[in-house]
Image: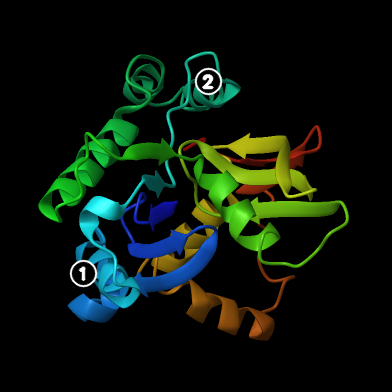
């Protein structure tokens, strides 16, 4: 079985990886070919071509295409949390409820176009969308080498709606325990502070991280911006 994994669902760092019978045979990142750091807003065209060339695989030999962005059902607490927490922006709340998978369908359209453009028949291959944070968890757990029950935590800006993932891996499977949802995002706050300090979001966060040890934690009180409530962190969305 030949599986092509594509990244770039959240508009940065597009990449591709190719597995043959469960073994990684090629991987590449789009920015290396475009010479455009993070390749923002791009799909992994050149990275996919490179993976196929490295592996000596024809486009029509690919069986499965996996992508890190899935549909989230209306019954999911994620969409309702987003709608309730965006009380100050009714248009966003209503969009989450009535058009909550619009980004998924935009990604789906872009992936199908990429496949057809590269000679991979989008109607023939099996397309497997995977929840964004489950992908993050998988990349950590399945490469860790741990055999025993293993705790997993994932924190980023956000995937579909989730911003933080708690779960565990056991016997090769990942189990979700709990998630926090947008707008309550540590990664979102970090990105916003990165931009506030004059750096570029989705690029300069590592610079802020490097400066952090030189800061004075007692100089500024962040409790008005982000706080804990009932065992969960919340971002203050009040103006």
Q: For this rendering, which residue is in front, 231 or 168?
A: 168
Q: Quadrant of residue 32?
A: bottom left
Q: Which one is closest to the eye, mark 2 or mark 1?
A: 1
Query: Which numbered disc covers residue 46?
Result: 1
**Colour scheme:** rainbow
Q: Secondary structure at mark 2?
A: helix
Residue designated by label 2: 84
Residue drawn at (41%, 47%) of the image: 66
Query: Which numbered disc covers residue 96?
Result: none
Q: What is the x, y in percent for residue 56?
A: 29, 72
Determine whether, in the image, residue 160 is placed left or right of residue 175: left
Q: Quadrant of residue 127?
A: top left
Q: What is the x, y in percent for residue 51?
A: 32, 70
Q: Which class describes the residues within 10 Å of circle 1: few (<14), some (14-19), or many (20+)?
A: many
The residues tagged by marks 2 and 1 sit, at their Cα atoms, a distance apart of 41 Å
Q: What is the x, y in percent for residue 209?
A: 58, 76
Asked if residue 42 shows in the view, the reply is no
Q: What is the x, y in percent for residue 228?
A: 75, 42
């Amino acid at each position: 079985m030949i599986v092509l994994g594509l990244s770039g669902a959240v508009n940065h760092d597009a990449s591709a990886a190719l597995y043959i019978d469960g073994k990684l045979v090629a991987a590449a990142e789009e920015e290396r070919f475009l010479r455009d750091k993070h390749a923002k807003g791009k799909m992994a065209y050149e990275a996919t071509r490179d993976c196929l060339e490295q592996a000596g695989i024809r486009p029509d030999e690919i069986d499965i295409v996996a992508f890190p962005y899935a549909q989230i059902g209306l019954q999911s607490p994620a969409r309702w949390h987003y709608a309730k927490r965006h009380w100050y922006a009714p248009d966003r709340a209503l969009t989450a409820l009535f058009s909550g998978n619009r980004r998924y369908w935009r990604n789906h359209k872009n992936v199908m176009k990429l496949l057809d453009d590269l000679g991979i028949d989008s109607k023939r291959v099996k397309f497997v969308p995977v929840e964004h944070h489950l992908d993050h968890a998988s990349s950590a757990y399945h490469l860790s080498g741990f055999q025993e029950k293993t705790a997993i935590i994932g924190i980023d800006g956000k995937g579909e709606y989730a911003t933080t993932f708690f779960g565990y891996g056991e016997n090769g499977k990942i189990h979700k325990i709990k998630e926090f949802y947008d707008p309550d995002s540590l990664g979102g706050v970090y990105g916003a502070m990165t931009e506030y300090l004059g750096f570029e979001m989705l690029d300069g966060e590592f610079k802020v991280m490097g400066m952090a040890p030189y800061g004075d934690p007692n100089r500024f009180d962040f409790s008005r911006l982000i706080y804990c409530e009932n065992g969960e962190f919340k971002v203050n969305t009040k103006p």
